[in-house]
């Protein structure tokens, strides 16, 4: 009888221990699945050096401190969870309980730390470890049009500037304007136009534009304002108007007056705002206006 009673007691103890072990294991797996759900529902992506929209990443998370929350000793092997996710169009990662986590512009290491901080702030984990590895790169496309040497669509990385894009397009042609435009659509499809003054590159008094490109942007380089010069000049042609250009400077741009020509016999055919044309006799110091047609006449004797 005592042996039978002892056996019964042992069975009861084993049953209690088994029940506690199941509860402990269930508690650990609840935490594991909570982290797995948070990781799978994440939406992250990255360029090779910084985070941006559209790139596939493999995310690995380690449950480092679940035992501190469950109050029960867990196995020494920390479970490792992984998933592949993407960044949202606005550069954010939607984390359950943590909300939107901004990762655009961060390096993979910085984004990993920010995700870990977000999981920790959710009070589900004490010391989560998150690793991000680039698995597939999806380039962002922007367009450059107008007076550039190679207008086309180009893949760009995060933090690519307008100057970088112009370099990819071979630079602006001689007829290109100094003020170009960035066309940027919003989520509703409306396009905003932002002027960019390139004169800041050579004029220390002007600010240098530092606009960073986004996928879907278009850079348009319009043709510069021009004038025409004909008659007794060495190189009659069409030329761009430089800031503050005078009639005398325009004749110099055209190669100068020939021996048969006269600086005192110059006329300009000019278009008025109402699209009428008039012919004026300018002074050499008068400014040249867009689309002016300058004619240098022959000497009388």
Image (cartoon, helix red, strand yellow):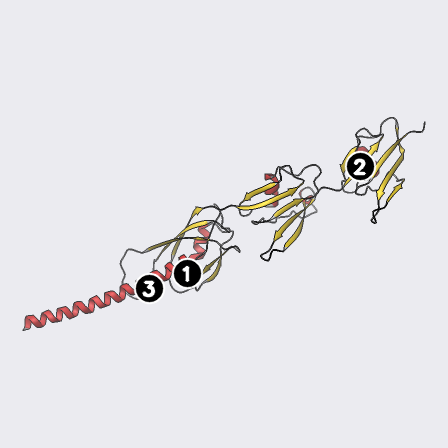
- Tell which residue pokes out farthest to the left in this image: 1
Between residue 279 and residue 50, name the one nearer to us.
279
Name which quarter of the figure residue 69 lies in.
bottom left
Residue 273, given in percent of the width and then of the height, sits at 82, 49
Q: Earlier in the sequence, mark 1 or mark 2?
A: 1
- Mark yes or no: residue 160 visible: no
Look at discs 3 and 2 and give the one toward the viewer: 2
- Marks 2 and 3: in contact by CB < 8 Å? no
Q: CA distance from mark 1 to mark 2?
A: 67 Å
Look at discs 3 and 1 and give the one toward the viewer: 3
- Element under disc 1: helix
- Element under disc 3: helix
Residue 189, given in percent of the width and then of the height, sits at 60, 55
Report the residue marked by disc 2: 228
Report the residue marked by disc 3: 30
Q: Looking at the rendering, in which quadrant would you find the C terminus?
A: top right
Q: CA distance from mark 3 to mark 2?
A: 79 Å
Report the residue marked by disc 1: 119
Residue 147, given in percent of the width and then of the height, sits at 67, 40
Q: Residue at x 86, y 33 (%)?
A: 296
Residue 81, given in percent of the width and then of the height, sits at 35, 55
Residue 109: numbered disc: none
Residue 143 in the figure: left or right of residue 269: left
Name which quarter of the figure residue 126 lies in.
bottom left
Residue 196 in the figure: left or right of residue 67: right
């Amino acid at each position: 009888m005592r042996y039978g009673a002892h056996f019964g007691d042992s069975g009861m103890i084993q049953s209690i221990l088994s029940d506690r072990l199941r509860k402990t294991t269930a508690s650990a797996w609840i935490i594991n699945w909570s982290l797995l759900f948070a990781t799978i529902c994440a939406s992250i992506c990255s360029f090779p050096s910084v985070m941006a929209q559209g790139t596939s990443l493999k995310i690995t998370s380690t449950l480092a401190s679940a035992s501190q929350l469950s109050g029960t000793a867990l196995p020494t092997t920390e479970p490792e969870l992984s998933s592949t996710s993407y960044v949202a169009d606005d550069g954010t990662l939607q984390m359950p309980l943590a909300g939107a986590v901004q990762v655009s512009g961060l390096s993979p290491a910085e984004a990993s730390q920010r995700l870990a901080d977000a999981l920790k702030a959710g009070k589900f984990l004490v010391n989560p470890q998150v690793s991000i590895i680039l698995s597939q790169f999806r380039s962002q496309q922007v367009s450059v049009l107008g007076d550039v040497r190679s207008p086309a669509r180009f893949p760009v990385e995060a933090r690519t500037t307008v100057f970088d894009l112009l370099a990819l397009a071979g630079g602006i042609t001689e007829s290109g304007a100094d003020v170009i435009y960035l066309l940027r659509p919003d989520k509703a499809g409306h396009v905003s136009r932002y002027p960019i003054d390139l004169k800041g590159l050579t004029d220390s008094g002007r600010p240098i534009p530092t606009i960073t490109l986004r996928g879907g942007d278009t850079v348009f380089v319009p043709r510069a304002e021009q004038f025409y010069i004909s008659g007794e000049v060495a190189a009659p042609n069409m030329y761009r108007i430089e800031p503050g250009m005078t009639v005398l400077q325009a004749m110099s741009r055209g190669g100068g007056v020939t021996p048969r020509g006269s600086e005192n016999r110059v006329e300009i055919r000019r278009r008025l705002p109402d699209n009428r044309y008039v012919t004026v006799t300018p002074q050499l110091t008068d400014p040249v206006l867009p689309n002016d047609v300058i004619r240098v006449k022959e000497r009388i004797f």
